[in-house]
Amino acid sequence: MVDSQVVQQELIGVGDPTPISLNWNLEYPDPGILGRTPYKHNIKRVTDGWDDYLDGYFPQGSSQWDAMCHCRHPELGYYNGVLATDEFDGGLSVREKLGIHNLARAGITARFILIDIVNFHAQSGVSWSGMSGFQISKELLISILDFQETTLQSGDILILRTGWTEEYSNFSPSARVQLAAAPLKISGLKNDESLIEWLWDQGVVGIAADNPTVEATPFDVSDPATFMHYQLIPLLGFLLGELFDLEALAKRCAESSKWHGVIISAPLNIYAGVGSPANSIALV
């Protein structure tokens, strides 16, 4: 029988690991962005207490994982050669093969490396915003890894802290309305072939970011060459997560000068689902 504590220590080092939730407020962003509207929380009185249910709930509305069926390359189709012979079936044939239930049944457990762009710029005395549309290059990622004295390993999930969710959480309600109505400017990964090749060569299997898109905006979803999702999901099979809450994790990593650990996620077992709330914790 496998001792889970031994496995954790082998992945993140000796000691007593601290669990940290990576799940942002389920009701954020509000107003919704990217076509995903906030849910309505309904409360129902029952004999011995209360029940509740959600109307209009988008599983990818807040901290979330994309399923492999989330994104189809316009020219080359879905991940692993899965073909959609009839998109008018609601994509069921694709979603059965590549839906989130496939991840949910096994769960997600991996070593992570936190690349903390916010901390790097703060220590360097350089201003930074997760909402500036800055394009994060391969060279910057390597510089931060060197600064943190960390090394990626094959099988790692890269956790990318841009500060987007933290900035959003500090906005007033009126500022959130303005943000939702305007074209989104999101600091994220640069859609660059050399960056994608580097991630692949490092053996990275997934990226979880605290912004809504992982990649920088603006982008053009009509052009395969300018939308990084087309490269990462259907062509390379990367696991992508967005809107993770990374503030507490970043604080813990900075205090311990240790930027790696274990990420554990239990996506919802939605058969043929396109995505799921992250349901993620980190052990550091």
Image: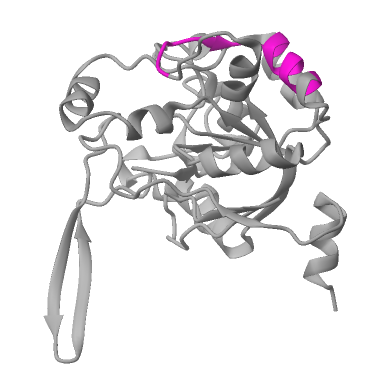
Asked whether the viewer can see residue 278, the reply is yes
Q: Residue at x 59, y 30 (%)?
A: 160
Between residues 73 and 93, which one lies in front from this camera angle?
73
Residue pictured at 53% horizontal, 23% vertical: 230
Nearest the viewer among 123 and 233 is: 123
Image: 91 above or below 15: above
Instruction: Where is residue 191? Give x, y as percent.
Output: 57, 12
Q: Is residue 3 left or right of residue 96?
A: right
Q: Horizontally, is 204 left or right of 26 in the view? A: right
Q: Is residue 186 above or below residue 258?
A: above
The N terminus is located in which quarter? Answer: bottom right
Locate residue 154 relative to residue 110 in the image: left or right.
right
Picture residue at 54% right of the left edge, 19% below the top: 228
- Tell me residue 85's x, y (percent): 44, 39
Q: Which residues are magenta?
A: 131-146
User: As displayed, is residue 49 above or below residue 56?
Assistant: below
| Residue 181 sits in quarter | top left
